[in-house]
Amino acid sequence: MTERQKQILSAIIEQYAEVAAPVGSSLLAKVFGVSSATIRAEMAELERMGYIAQPHTSAGRIPTDRGYRLYVNSLAQAAEGIPERRAERALSARVQHGGLPERTIRNAVDTLVELTHNLGLATIGGQLYISGLSNLFGQPEFTTGNQVQQVARLLDNLEPWLREAAPNEPLSVFIGSENPIGRSAGVSLRAPAPAARPRPGCAAAPRRTPAAPPPATRG
């Protein structure tokens, strides 16, 4: 993949995350200062490689799970060694000054929801704490009943999965079909990988917004 193709893919992902609509060549041509024909040729190559797709004839392009994966991996590599960001400092402050462990976890999840405008979850004393449902279901992807049912089924299966999550292990981003508990739900999770011991905390978002701050952990 050329450097320009990487930049075009990033632009498609970021624009699609913003407007939840296929991204056309004319918009990208203005961004990159080249002709629409040049952008269409690059998009055709990205589509051939499986990083973007055309939902229907005459539409723009949307990212695929493979495209999101490349984008998230590149963000993770770029973030290595970067000082703590403002959002992460806000989350750390809520955790450090939350008081009782249960309140600390709730504060951290609520902060995560405020920062991402999506859904945050954690297990507290064996119970599932959920915040931000209205954020998740207010996204354009969830205007149809079928999509809402798929996400509701994911949430039904989430608590036992969290109980098997590895404690104090690096967090993973599960994008779309990579999601181990809801491949057809059309959402991404940032959560610990399954293991033998419980660790609470994950964030759920529409598949088009997979790169969120880390979720809360047990105090």
Image (cartoon, rainbow, N blue to C red):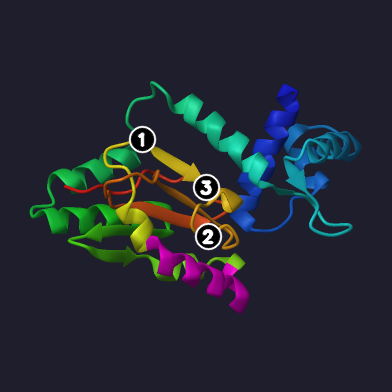
Residue nearest the observer in this picture, 77 or 159: 159
Across and down, in percent, residue 117 comes to 42, 58
Which of the 4 image quadrants contains residue 59? bottom right
Residue 75 left/right relative to 218: right
Q: Does residue 81 sit above or below 150 in this rendering?
A: above
Q: Which residue is mark 1?
A: 170
User: Please, what secondary structure does the residue beneath circle 3 have?
Assistant: loop
Q: Which residue is mark 2?
A: 182
- State which region is magenta: 142-158
Q: Which residue is mark 3?
A: 210
Across and down, in percent, residue 189 comes to 46, 51
Q: Nearer the viewer, mark 3 or mark 1?
A: 1
Residue nearest the observer in this picture, 168 or 8: 168
Residue nearest the observer in this picture, 195 or 188: 195
User: Please, what secondary structure does the residue beneath circle 1 have?
Assistant: loop
Q: Does residue 148 sit above or below 65 in this rendering?
A: below
Most common secondary structure along the magenta stretch:
helix
